[in-house]
């Protein structure tokens, strides 16, 4: 019953529009006061110091800075233009370019919000220019942006690795195949929608082969960054944190080559990084204290005992967990959802004893379910980011409705991962086993 009241309290506070970090902090101190007579709050300094000095967490602001430099140096807009020239022949035209560019940008930024915002700014003017269905167009940006937390390098996978002590290089390898399959399934959804309703796909943009080949150099930047970041990790040259620093240096070098490296650009990128990092760390630290309180209350053990008593098979248990995350994703921001639920749910998955249900596999499944939460109203973060890109305004419901078709591939991928865990585990097993 305590666990149930905790979930209800979180939902009520979030619906009241209280910031997520404040919700988690208030709940942690409130539970400590009610159940522990405020004894645990005396240890908060030690908890925060122990967790905040984790070397892996330094990679989060570095990856955020990398995305900011990509955005403000103009690299992202040129990348969008290049991808659009190669994909406009498909039914749906530039909607496919939205997803394709988000996939490329995801392989350098590690953030879903940064991916949606960056590609959205570059793509939005094309709606009126080519008469696209605005709802589907904006929905594709919100959905495509979710790939930022799945395709390496990913800040969310780093946090999952820190929370569960799972190998981050293995998590990165495991994210490749599901991420690419999800991107292709998004494009398939657009293809089906625009084949059934051709008017949604806007006017066809004609591009010559000469134009396509001439823009290939603009696609070199994400490739160089990807090789610098992910390649340095698997070559054994750098840790994930060091690889993030390498990525930042390479992004600055690319900005210099493109003659967009200025003091004002660096200042804007640094300011954006500070704001985003402060928001993330506020949520992280509040969630860490809440998890500390949960541990002393015995919430995790109680939930484990209840689920064990149900006598469910591993697959049935995982289906319940999927349903739980889908419902919770409607009301919680993804980062806070990961930080508050993974420490509770992960021991349940371990206890299942299923050979294929490994920590690496569960990390990918969790991130995909987090992705679904990013485009599920009323709290879906990417929906609000996409709405914020609309300089001409419009109803928030249009973006939410446009993103709904992309929920189907996400849920299908989650079920496929439960049925065939090898989709996520095959690549890391090939490299590390």
Image (tube, rainbow, N blue to C red):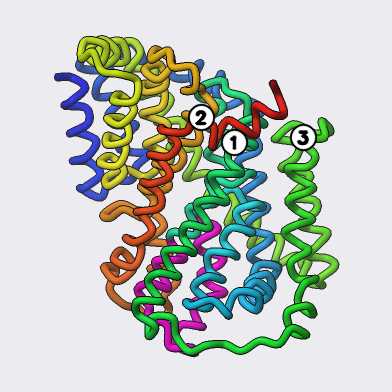
For the residues labelled 1 and 3, say whether their Cβ atoms are less than 8 Å apart. Answer: no
Residue matched to label 1:
174
Residue matched to label 2:
361
Spatial separation of the CA atoms under disc 1 and disc 3 = 13 Å
Q: In this view, does 126 lie to the left or right of 238?
A: left
Magenta segment boundaries in residue numbering: 113-142
Check the image and report above or below for 6 versus 189: above
For the residues labelled 2 and 1, say whether their Cβ atoms are less than 8 Å apart. Answer: yes
Q: Which comes sooner in the sequence, label 2 or label 1?
A: 1
- Label 1: which secondary element: helix
Judged by its main secondary structure, the magenta piece is helix
| Residue at horizontal 47 percent and vertical 77 percent from the top | 92
Indicate yes or no whether the magenta region holds residue 139.
yes
Spatial separation of the CA atoms under disc 3 and disc 2 = 19 Å
Query: Alpha-carbon neighbours of circle 1 within 10 Å: few (<14), some, or many (≥20)?
Result: many
Q: Which comes sooner in the sequence, label 1 or label 3?
A: 1
Q: Is residue 213 left or right of residue 114?
A: right
Query: Alpha-carbon neighbours of circle 3 within 10 Å: few (<14), some, or many (≥20)?
Result: some
| Residue at horizontal 26 percent and vertical 68 percent from the top | 397
Residue matched to label 3:
234
């Amino acid at each position: 019953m305590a666990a149930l009241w905790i979930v209800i309290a979180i939902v009520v506070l979030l619906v009241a529009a209280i910031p997520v970090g404040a919700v988690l902090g208030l709940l942690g101190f409130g539970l400590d006061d009610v159940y522990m007579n405020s004894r645990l709050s005396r240890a908060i300094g030690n908890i925060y110091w122990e967790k905040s000095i984790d070397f892996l967490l330094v990679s989060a602001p570095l990856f955020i800075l990398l995305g900011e430099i990509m955005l403000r140096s103009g690299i992202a807009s040129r990348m969008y233009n290049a991808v659009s020239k190669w994909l406009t022949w498909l039914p749906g035209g530039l909607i496919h370019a939205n997803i394709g560019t988000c996939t490329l940008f995801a392989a350098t930024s590690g953030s879903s919000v940064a991916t949606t915002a960056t590609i959205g700014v570059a793509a939005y003017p094309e709606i009126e220019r080519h008469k696209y269905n605005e709802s589907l167009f904006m929905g594709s940006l919100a959905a495509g942006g979710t790939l930022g937390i799945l395709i390496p390098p990913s800040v969310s996978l780093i946090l999952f690795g820190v929370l569960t002590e799972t190998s981050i290089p293995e998590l990165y390898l495991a994210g490749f195949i599901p991420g690419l399959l999800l991107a292709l399934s998004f494009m398939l959804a657009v293809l089906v929608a625009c084949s059934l309703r051709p008017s949604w796909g806007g006017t066809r943009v004609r591009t010559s082969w000469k134009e396509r080949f001439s823009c290939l150099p603009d696609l070199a930047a994400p490739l160089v960054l990807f090789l610098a970041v992910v390649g340095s990790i698997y070559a054994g040259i750098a840790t994930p944190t060091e690889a993030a620093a390498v990525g930042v240096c390479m992004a600055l070098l690319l900005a210099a080559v493109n003659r967009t490296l200025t003091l004002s650009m660096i200042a804007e990128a640094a300011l954006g990084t500070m704001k985003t990092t402060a928001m993330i760390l506020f949520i992280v630290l509040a969630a860490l204290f809440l998890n500390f309180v949960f541990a002393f209350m015995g919430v995790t053990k109680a939930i484990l005992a209840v689920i064990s008593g149900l006598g469910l098979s591993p697959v049935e248990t995982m289906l319940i967990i999927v349903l739980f995350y889908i419902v919770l994703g409607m009301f919680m921001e993804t980062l806070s959802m990961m930080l508050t639920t993974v420490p509770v749910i992960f021991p349940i998955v371990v206890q299942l004893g299923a050979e294929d249900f490994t920590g690496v596999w569960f990390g990918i499944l969790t991130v995909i379910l987090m992705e679904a939460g990013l485009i599920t109203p009323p709290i879906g973060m990417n929906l609000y980011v996409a709405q914020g890109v609309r300089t001409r305004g419009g109803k928030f419901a249009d973006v939410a409705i446009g993103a709904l078709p992309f929920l189907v591939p996400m849920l299908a991928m989650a079920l496929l991962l439960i049925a065939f865990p090898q989709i996520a585990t095959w690549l890391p097993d090939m490299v590390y086993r």
